[in-house]
Image (tube, rainbow, N blue to C red):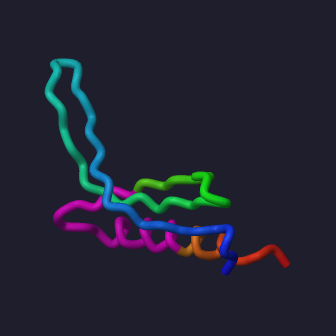
């Protein structure tokens, strides 16, 4: 793992406004990659009250990709 590359998990609900002015909020987790303190990538994965197998797999894939990214280049 490189000290210059950091992965953070953040609980980040997303708000979506409808045309009629009502807003909906969706819970989710952001997998945030930073390099030298600057955000270089952010993947938001929705998390429902009853997550599906596909939801779990999407989060696992996002985490794995981010953690592999933290390894120094060979």
* Quadrant of the snapshot with the C terminus: bottom right
Question: Is 18 colored magenta in this rendering?
Answer: no
Question: Which quarter shows the N terminus?
Answer: bottom right
Residue 25: percent from left, percent from top: 21, 44
Judged left or right of residue 41, residue 19 is left
Answer above or below: position of 40 versus 51.
above
Q: In the figure, is residue 67 to the left or right of 4?
A: left
Name the residue located 47 percent from the left edge and 62 percent from the top edge.
31
Relative image position of residue 42 (x, y in whole percent): 51, 53
Residue 39 relative to residue 22: left or right: right
Residue name at image x 25 percent, y 54 percent: 27
Tell me where residue 51 sits by quadrant: bottom left
The picture places residue 28, in percent across and down from the top left corner, at: 31, 57
Q: Residue at x 18, y 32 (%)?
A: 23
Judged left or right of residue 74, residue 22 is left
- Image coordinates of residue 70 in percent, x first then y, are 65, 73
**49 magenta-colored:** yes
Q: In the rendered view, would you say 42 is above or below 22?
A: below
Of residue 3 and residue 67, the one placed in the foreground of this image is: 3
Residue most extreme to the right: 74
Residue 5 image-quadrant placement: bottom right
Over which residues does the magenta segment extend? 45-63
At a point 23% along the width and 60% down the height, the residue shown is 48
Q: Is residue 54 above or below residue 74?
A: above
**Count of numbered labels shown in the rendering:** 0
């Amino acid at each position: 793992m490189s000290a210059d590359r950091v992965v953070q998990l953040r609980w980040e609900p997303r708000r979506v406004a409808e045309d009629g002015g009502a807003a909906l909020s969706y819970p989710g987790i952001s997998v945030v990659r930073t390099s030298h303190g600057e955000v270089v990538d952010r993947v938001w994965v929705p998390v429902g009250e009853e997550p599906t197998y596909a939801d779990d797999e999407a989060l696992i894939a996002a985490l794995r990709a981010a953690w592999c990214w933290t390894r120094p280049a060979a």
